[in-house]
Amino acid sequence: MDVKNKEFWEKKEVINTQNISKTPYNYEKYLFKEATSRLNKVRNFEAANIYGCGTGRDIKVIEEHFKPKLIVASDISENMIEGCKENLKGWNIKSNVQLHVADASKLKVDSDKFDLVTLLNSMLTYVPKRKNRLRIFQNSYDSLIERGVVIGVVHNQIGRPMKTYYFRLRKLFSFLLKDKVGNKSTGFKGYKLPGYYYDKKWLKKDLAHAGFKNISIMSLEEFFQNTGRAYDKSKSYNQLIFICNK
């Protein structure tokens, strides 16, 4: 069934797949460590801006690692935010948490305020139009203090064979498709919606367009290779992880 982004994330069966409390993935721990290293040179950690917070899992892991005084978290789904409110009641969250129901491309938060912005859980995969992804990156940039950090995860054009071949074919027509090479239907639980899959070139280009510097991007395959472990990209999503500074 074809649905729109907000409609998809309002559905109970979709929310149930996200309504879990997990410890950070290894690649998230790496991003947290790198962010901490960069931020230690700036000031004590005070505030985090979380886009696509879902039912609160990102709030929990960010609070546990960084212990910020303030967390501003947002999601496009009203039902996700309601679930997040319920979860926060049962968690020992000491940060001041402010929740918003909003499209990340339209949400304006205070400028020059946050030490960290997170774009985790491949939330940008569900933003098919480049102009909206650029707005999200720009909003992220504007909200950060000088030398603040953004970390994120996006779906990769290189991974399972059928996905990889699909994007290789589309790249042959990149002179026509341009920034739309990465567009592909996505979704689960029987629902389909427009999506977008990045490659390193376009991800770096979009981050730089917003003004970010010290941009570091790697695939999960590369991340696991760097830690001496095997990763079979033919059976996995092989997401791209990134970190950069204002």
Image: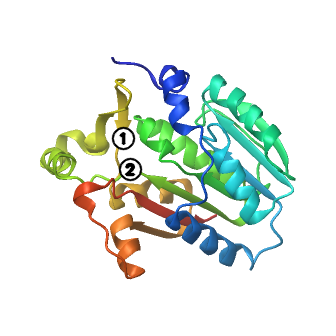
For label 1, the residue is 196
Q: Quadrant of the C terminus?
A: bottom right
Q: Which residue is drawn at 63% across and 50% down?
A: 140
Q: In which quarter of the image is residue 79?
A: top right
Q: What residue type is labelled 2?
A: His
Question: Do we see residue 176 in this rendering?
Answer: yes
Q: On the image, numbered disc 2 is attached to which residue?
A: 155
Q: Which amino acid does label 1 sit on?
A: Tyr
CA–CA distance in space, label 2 to label 1: 8 Å
Residue 193 rendering spot, x and y as whole percentages? 37, 26
Which residue is located at x 55 percent, y 51 percent? 120
- Which of the two residues, 171 or 126, is positioned nearer the viewer here? 126
Q: Residue 179 placed where, x, y %?
A: 31, 44
Name above or below for residue 53 compared with residue 66: above
Secondary element at image label 1: strand
The answer to whether 78 appears left or right of 165 in the picture is: right
Q: Where is residue 210 in the image (x, y as percent from the top left)?
A: 55, 53
Q: Which of marks 2 and 1 is in front?
A: 2
Q: Would you say 159 lies left or right of 16 here?
A: left
Left or right of 166 on screen, residue 88: right
Q: Residue at x 44, y 36 (%)?
A: 126
**235 vs 128: above or below:** below
Which mark sits nearer the N-terminus, 2 or 1?
2
The answer to whether residue 33 is left or right of residue 193 is: right
Which mark is drawn over residue 147?
none
Observer able to see residue 158: no
**x 73%, y 38%: residue:** 87
Q: Nearer the viewer, residue 219 or 17?
A: 17
